Image: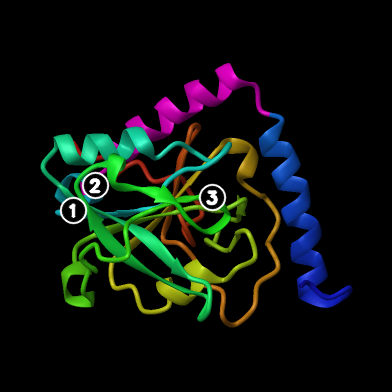
């Protein structure tokens, strides 16, 4: 549980604000934004060259990844999604061959079966990881849902970390961060592509 002061309290208030803001997005706007994000992501050379996509499975009003996962399968890529271990507050990515293999897990989020093949660290080289979150700033700091699962995984992940976000989830102000928070490398939104830590929009990463 978050404390009533310091970084935890600050993150908690930001988290609450962006949960409400994202939840208020009209359905037609969300659908259009999801298509724009998917299109911009799949134009990236990083995406085109990646043999493996590690993706969260969208739930509720998150940026949709189900169509992205289906596109990855259609393009001959391997796909893996996370399975959370609530005892250790950690997660591992398991290969799937269809979204139909998933079942409700932690917080009712769809997860792979426990006996699905785990992705080894060596196999993650050259992959991309699609990272969820509630809000992101320009240097790649993110505030998620408070479990710390992704930060623990991303601390050793060797590939490119790509956040998917709606424009309303982009903060012009620095977000509170701790030493254990892991920044993303790039943010793909419905309005722009942003290489974190670079003070300009990236116009050269689009894979032409």
Q: Is residue 43 visible?
A: no
> Closest to the observer: 140 or 204?
140
Label 1 CA crowd tier, 10 Å (few <14, some 14–19, many 20+): some
**Residue 177 location, quadrant:** bottom right
Residue at far top of view: 28
Secondary element type, mark 2: helix
At which x and y percent is residue 128? 28, 57
Q: Which residue is mark 1?
A: 50
In the figure, is residue 37 to the left or right of 39? right
At which x and y percent is residue 55? 35, 52
At which x and y percent is residue 138? 56, 56
In the figure, is residue 202 to the left or right of 135? left
Magenta-span inclusion, residue 44? yes
Q: Quadrant of the C terminus?
A: top left
Q: Is residue 25 visible?
A: yes
Magenta-colored span: 25-45
Q: Quadrant of the N terminus?
A: bottom right
Residue drawn 45% across the image and 67% down it: 84
Q: Which residue is mark 2?
A: 47
Q: Which residue is mark 3?
A: 108
């Amino acid at each position: 549980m978050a404390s009533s002061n310091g970084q935890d309290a600050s993150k908690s208030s930001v988290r609450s604000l962006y949960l409400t803001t994202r939840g208020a997005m009209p359905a037609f706007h969300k659908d259009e934004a999801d298509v724009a994000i998917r299109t911009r992501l799949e134009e990236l050379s990083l995406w085109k060259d990646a043999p493996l996509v590690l993706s969260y499975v969208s739930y509720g009003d998150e940026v949709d990844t189900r169509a992205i996962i289906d596109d990855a399968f259609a393009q001959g890529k391997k796909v893996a999604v996370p399975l959370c271990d609530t005892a250790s507050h950690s997660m591992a990515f398991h290969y799937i061959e269809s979204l139909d293999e998933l079942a409700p897990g932690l917080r009712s989020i769809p997860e792979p079966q426990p006996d699905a093949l785990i992705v080894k660290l060596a196999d993650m080289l050259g992959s991309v990881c699609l990272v969820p979150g509630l809000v992101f700033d320009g240097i790649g700091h993110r505030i998620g849902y408070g479990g710390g699962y992704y930060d623990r995984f991303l601390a050793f992940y060797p590939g490119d970390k790509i956040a998917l976000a709606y424009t309303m989830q982009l903060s012009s102000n620095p977000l509170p961060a701790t030493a254990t928070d892991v920044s993303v490398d790039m943010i793909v939104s419905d309005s722009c592509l942003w290489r974190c830590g670079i003070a300009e929009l990236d116009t050269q990463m689009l894979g032409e």
